[in-house]
Image: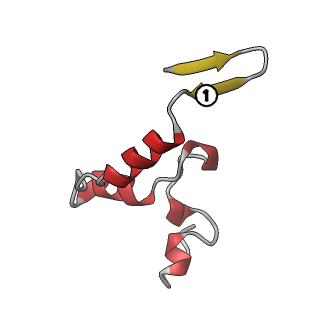
Amino acid sequence: MIELDVPHRKLNVLVSDEELARRKAEWVAPPPRFSRGYGAMHQVHVLQADKGCDFDFLQRGGASAEAGEPEIH
């Protein structure tokens, strides 16, 4: 169940802390869907929406800088 309180701008999942902990403990990450190509690049390098949905290696100080690769301009 989900509780939506529009006037107070709240969204709550009505699941106990114990149930959430149990689910987290049982969760197993699925295998990667792609092993190469654009799909694999997307899985590894595309940032989340709040960060602009851009490739991390196109950001200043992104993955390429950390990996010692040259900057991309």
Label 1 amino acid? Asn
Q: Residue at x 37, y 54 (%)?
A: 25
Q: Quadrant of the C terminus?
A: bottom right
- Observer-nearest residue: 8 or 16? 16
Q: Tell me where residue 36 appears, x and y as whole percent.
A: 23, 60
Q: Which residue is mark 1?
A: 12
Q: Is residue 71 above or below residue 73?
A: below
Q: Tell me where residue 62 appears, x and y as whole percent.
A: 57, 69
Q: How many residues crowd around disc 1 within 10 Å: few (fewer than 14), some, or many (20 or more)?
A: few
On screen, residue 51 versus residue 64, left or right, reads right
- Observer-nearest residue: 2 or 67? 2
On screen, residue 28 versus residue 10, left or right, reads left
Colour scheme in the image?
Answer: secondary structure
Q: Residue at x 23, y 50 (%)?
A: 33
SS category of the residue bearing label 1: strand
Q: Residue at x 30, y 54 (%)?
A: 29
Q: Could one spot residue 70 in this view of the protein?
A: no
- Observer-nearest residue: 43 or 55? 43
The residue positioned farthest toward the bottom in the image shown: 68
Q: Is residue 73 above or below residue 48?
A: below
**Which picture quadrant has residue 60?**
bottom right
Q: Could one spot residue 68 in this view of the protein?
A: yes
Tell me how many marks there are. Answer: 1
Q: Tell me where residue 44 appears, x and y as whole percent.
A: 39, 60
The residue positioned farthest toward the right in the image shown: 8
Q: Tell me where residue 47 appears, x and y as whole percent.
A: 52, 53
